Amino acid sequence: MKSFFWSLIFIFCTWSMFFIGKGVDNIDIMAERYKRALDAGANAASGYRAYDTEDILYRQGAGFGTGLENSNNVPIEREETVKWFYRLFFRNLGIMNIERQNEIKQYIPLKAIILFDRLMIADVDDNWHTYDPAGEKEYILQYRGKNYKFTLSDQIFDLESETWITAGDIGLESKDRKAIVTEYIISQLNSFLENRASGNNYKLVFSLDDAADSKLSGINGVNFIVFCEGMPIPSLNPFKKEKFFAYSVGGSEIKRNK
C-alpha cells in the first residue's frame, strides 16, 4: 500500500513537471513563431509587389542611395506594402478569421517605411497622417546652424542654395552623417510610440556605427519596420492561467528586383 502511495506521488510530480515544462516551452515556441511571422511579413512588405509596378524598380537608375539626386527615390504604394505585411503575418500564425485579425492588429501600433530621404509611419489603424499631416517627413536637420535635407547616403540637399552637395562639403564624415540621420529616425519612431494614448514608453535602438557595434542592426538602406506591442500568448501550464505578452520588432531591407 505504501509503495502504491509513493508511486501515485511520483506520477503526480512527473506530470506536474511535464505540464509546467510544456507551459514554458509553449511560451518560448510561440514567442519565436510570433517573431518569425513578423519578419516574414516585413519581408513580404519589402517585396516588389509593394511598389507601383515592377517596371518602376528597373527604371530607378543606381537607386537606393548610390546614384544621383532624385534618382535615388523609390515610389511605393504604402497601403499595398502594409497589406502584404498582414497577408503573410497572419498566414504564418494560421489566423484567417477577419474578426481575430482585427483584434490582433490592435497590438501593432507602428508600421514604418524608411525611405532614402523621408520617413513614413502608420498608426494602429494604418493611418499615415497621424505621424504628419502630409503622411511623411523628410530628413530636414540642422547642422552648424544651417538646415539641410539629409539622405541615407552622403548626398545632402542644401536648402538655401537649392543644390545637391555631399556630406564632405560641410565637413561631415560618412559615419557622422549616418549617425545624425539614424538618431533622427530613432527619435521619430520612439516619439511616435510615446505620444500614443496608451502612454507606454519604448526605446527602439539601431546601430549608429556598424563597424563598432555588430550586435545591433544599422539603417543602411530603405527599410520596412513593424513594432508589435504584445499579442498575449497563453501558457499550457494547467496550474496557472498565465499569459506572456510578446514585444518585438520586425524589419526587412527593401531590395530591388534584379
Image (tube, grey):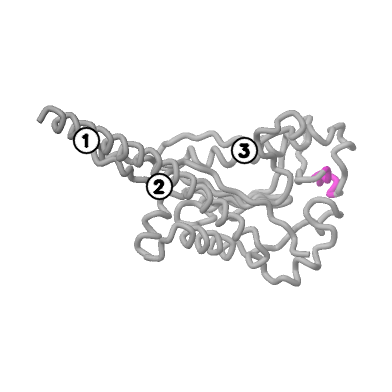
Disc number placed over residue 64 in the picture, else none? none
Q: In the image, what residue occupies the spot 62% across and 38% down? A: 186
Question: Disc 3 marks which residue?
Answer: 186
Q: Foreground mark, 3 or 2?
A: 2
Q: Position of residue 229 (x, y in %)?
A: 44, 43
Q: Which residues are magenta?
A: 154-162
Q: Foreground mark, 2 or 1?
A: 1
Q: Foreground mark, 1 or 3?
A: 1
Tell me: residue 241, above or below residue 3.
below
Q: Position of residue 96 (x, y in %)?
A: 41, 65
Left or right position of 14 against 33: left
Tell me: residue 212, above or below residue 32.
above
- Distance between the alpha carbons at the discs numbered 3 and 2: 23 Å
Q: Earlier in the sequence, mark 1 or mark 3?
A: 1
Question: Disc 1 marks which residue?
Answer: 12
Q: In the image, what residue occupies the spot 66% across and 39% down? A: 217
Foreground of the two, 207 or 37: 37
Question: Disc 2 marks which residue?
Answer: 231
Q: In the image, what residue occupies the spot 30% across and 34% down? A: 17
Dot 2 falls on a residue whose secondary structure is: loop
